Image: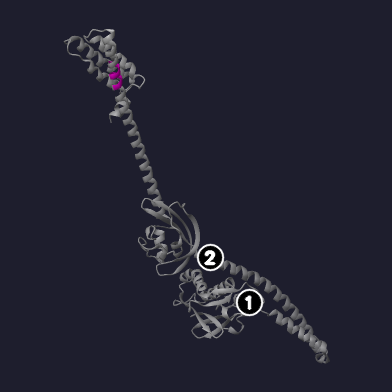
Amino acid sequence: MWAKIFKSRRPAYVVMEAVALMIVIAIVDLNIHAQVPLALVYLVPAAYAGTGLSRWQIPAFGALCTAIAEMADAFPWSVAQGIPRDALYFIAYTAAGLYVSEVLANRRREEEHLHEVELEGEARQQAEEQLRLLVTTSSIAIVTSDEQGRILQANDAAERLFGGGEKPLKLTGQGIAELIPALARAPSMGRGQRQLKTMMQCQGLRADLEPFFADVWFSTYRTAEGNRLTAMIVDSSKEIRDREEANLEQVLTGLRLLVGSVSHEIRNICAAIGFVQQKLATQRPDLVAQEDFKALQQLTTTLERLAAVELSQVKHQAGHVHLNRFLQDLRIIVGPSLREAGVSVDWDKGEDTAMVWADPQGLLQVFLNLIRNAEAALADRDDARLTLSVRKTKGFVQIRVADNGSGIADPDHLFNPFRTAKRKPGQLSMGLYLSRALVTSFHGDLRYEPNPAGAVFVVELLPVETVNESDAECCR
């Protein structure tokens, strides 16, 4: 406080007040007994001058104090006694002023530093409050864990994400490996190691152990309490599902146009040949038994067969597929849309070690088409249910997709081009036609089984141990 008071006073006022005080002391010194020296009293105005003068002005004021003190005292002046005495006066007065000046300067610096620290603390507090507000209100799940993997902090978005429903899950104190198993393998910061910042795509688990695809951005850093890991987590299941469905739709659209154009041209040719054949048989009955006429009939039959041929010759990059993991990924992709449609799903994945021979992308498109058809068939049911089950039979692994919908009215032509499994008249599709072609391309099969409780589609795949080298080569 005193430093601020002295700092606010002008040096001229300080000098005037110090000089006035010094004159008062000099007058008193001139009028008292000669044996009472007042030289030490001049330290008061000298020290007072130090509150307003600079360190270069203080020695000049000290010299002034020395001169007045010498003139006011009653001691005789001589070279032998006066010069040492005046030197001592000068040093004492100057030192007093410089001491007071330095004390006040240090006090001012301390107060300025304290003020800066207070401003920095307020700014840091505001920044932390804004960051806390940003984290709390962020739509991205953010969690922080310690060296042991225990979650220290989690925002509302993280609690909703891992809660899996409307009710948030309290995450503080839980192990982060229970939610994002891949983060348990993230390297912690050892002595001398640099901070780790990276991104990965992995699987997450909700409170009910339902898996989902997650994009995770995380970093490791060191604090006074130990190493920390902060992760931002985004559920990317919908984006993956939309991408796969878009890819399937693109394939279906392109092939529908291609096969439709070819079939149209072949049907035109067959119609023309059939018309000529009927006309010749009417006008020339004797031609029916001739070889040329029979050849014409054979040509017509071949073209009709060509118009109805399946795409079984389509080649895909088949290989070993871990069926359990495949169905886990499938569940992540289709689970949200089925929940939104009100369809209850039973997943019976059978043996965990089932390995089949298939093309993962092609197989995924097959099941997306089957599940999409089942979802459409169950749209009007309140008790909609879909069951996916895995069974091993002689020479095959069967994946059954069963629903409790209305079934298929005309299953005989179900896998022909421009037929549909959707239970609504007037709809045409090539989904099942292409799905069967995809499955047969890696030596599997797709068929329909009549069921009074709904529709059942069976995908049969070869176990990897039954695939010989020739079969493997033809699928590559």
* Nearest the eye: 229 or 167: 229
Q: Residues within 10 Å of mark 1 (few under 14, many from 20)?
A: some
Q: Is residue 170 above or below residue 23?
A: below
Q: Is residue 55 visible?
A: yes
- Residue that protrudes farthest toward the front in the picture: 80
Position in image of residue 304 (x %, y %): 72, 82
Find the magenta span and give its range.
89-95
Q: Quadrant of the C terminus?
A: bottom right
Numbered disc 1: secondary structure: helix
Which residue sits at x=45%, y=72%?
342
Q: Which residue is mark 1?
A: 472
**Label 2 amino acid?**
Ile
Which residue sits at x=28%, y=19%?
92
Numbered disc 2: secondary structure: helix
Going from N to C along the chain, the mark reached first, 1 or 2, is 2
Position in image of residue 407 (x %, y %): 53, 82
Position in image of residue 415 (x %, y %): 61, 80
Position in image of residue 457 (x %, y %): 54, 81
Residue 8 counted in the magenta span? no
Residue 49 found in image quarter: top left
Q: Nearer the viewer, mark 1 or mark 2?
A: 1
* Nearest the eye: 2 or 354: 354
Residue 264 found in image quarter: bottom right
Q: Quadrant of the N terminus?
A: top left
**Label 1 amino acid?**
Ala
Q: Which residue is mark 2?
A: 240
Q: Is residue 79 above or below residue 417?
A: above
- Label 1 to label 2, Cα distance in Å? 29 Å
Per the picture, the main secondary structure of the magenta-coloured stretch is: helix
Q: Is residue 106 above or below residue 213?
A: above
* Nearest the eye: 310 or 459: 459
